[in-house]
Image: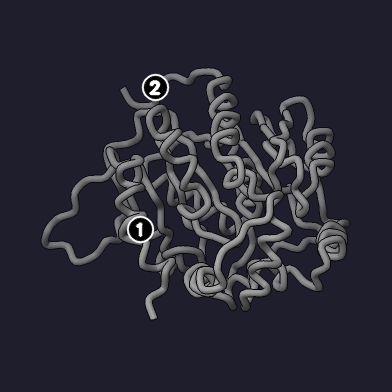
Amino acid sequence: MVNLVAIQEPLIIMLMKMAGVQTHAIEIEPGTIMNFWVPNETIQKPNKKSKTTVVTTINPKPEKPVVVLVHGFAAEGIATWQFQIGSLSKEYSVYVPDLLFFGGSISDSPDRSPTFQAECLVKGLRKLGVERCVVVGFSYGGMVAFKMAELYPEMIRAMVISGSILSMTDSISELTLKELGFSSSSELLLPDSVKGLKALLSVATHKKLWFPDRLHKDYLEVMFNNRKERGELLEGLIVSNKDITIPYFPQRIHLLWGENDQIFKMELAQNMKWELGENTTVEGIPKAGHLVHIERPCVYSRCLKKFLASLPAEEPLHK
């Protein structure tokens, strides 16, 4: 039987190319390949004799300010940011990675930490010619974005974080799961049944969505592969409360939240603002849950673009 989600892939590729991005695989290091959606204008046509789509560099380098959109745990890059790409691509060079074990990204490394994801993502961006960027991180991608900014402050101009926290401590994990009625992170974020996927969507959205069971089943088959590795990613997220320190971030940080987020509630964003200091601002979007960028895409994009426009202009990197 035809998978209704998988069959849409050629159409999505065409629509994303029209929106300004297309897919390319980058070898980060031997055994690690990361898929990126990159601006159309940065891609050189491959040599017709070449039999591989994996490249180590792409030219020319981006001329417009760079925005990197980092997805969460229940979907790959394009499925997460499909509504934002078109609205950003006229003014910005938009890069959308698939984190390791999502989309076409793989690694034979045993490291499952957000730090390793951040290191690989930065290496990939540098191979793509990106020297400075604003990173937008959602949920799991927000934790990766925080690591990028902590480890590579010279690269990250600013951050927009939605539905995420600095680190998943054992106490936050236990409290969140208890409040949501799940026994483990895997039960919540790695559903293996239509019932489980419906439960995840129920807590992730403000307005309840209805889809036929057939579509839920097809989505599970396409979006929840690499289950073993993703389970290990969830295990690699948890850190002890006693090991937590709040890094100093020189960048501006904007916490852009769904006011009805049940997974990471608005009060967590307010607490983070206090912890992160005067460079941090917080903004809530009403009638939206954890999936704020999908439930209120126009409002989200408008808020995102307003923040981006408020950043001081930088000298052109390439003259």
Instruction: Look at the image and tell me in which quarter the C terminus lies.
Output: top left
Residue at the (67%, 74%) spot, across then down = 195
Amino acid residing under circle 2? Pro
Front residue of 228 and 121: 228
**Does 295 sit left or right of 101 as displayed?**
right
Residue at the (36%, 67%) spot, across then down = 7
Q: How is the image coloured?
A: one colour
Quickly name the residue at label 1: 25
Q: Position of residue 154 (x, y in %)?
A: 55, 34
Is label 1 in a helix, a strand or a loop? strand
Disc 1: CA contacts within 10 A as few (<14), some (14-19) or many (>=20): many
**Does 273 sit left or right of 59 as displayed?**
right
Is label 2 in a helix, a strand or a loop? loop
Residue at the (47%, 70%) spot, across then down = 222
**Does 25 sit left or right of 152 as displayed?**
left
The reply to whether residue 121 is in sight is yes
Amino acid residing under circle 1? Ala
Quickly name the residue at label 2: 316
Front residue of 25 and 120: 25
Q: Mark 2 and mark 1: span between their CA atoms?
A: 27 Å
Query: Is residue 125 placed above or below 181 in the rendered structure?
Result: above
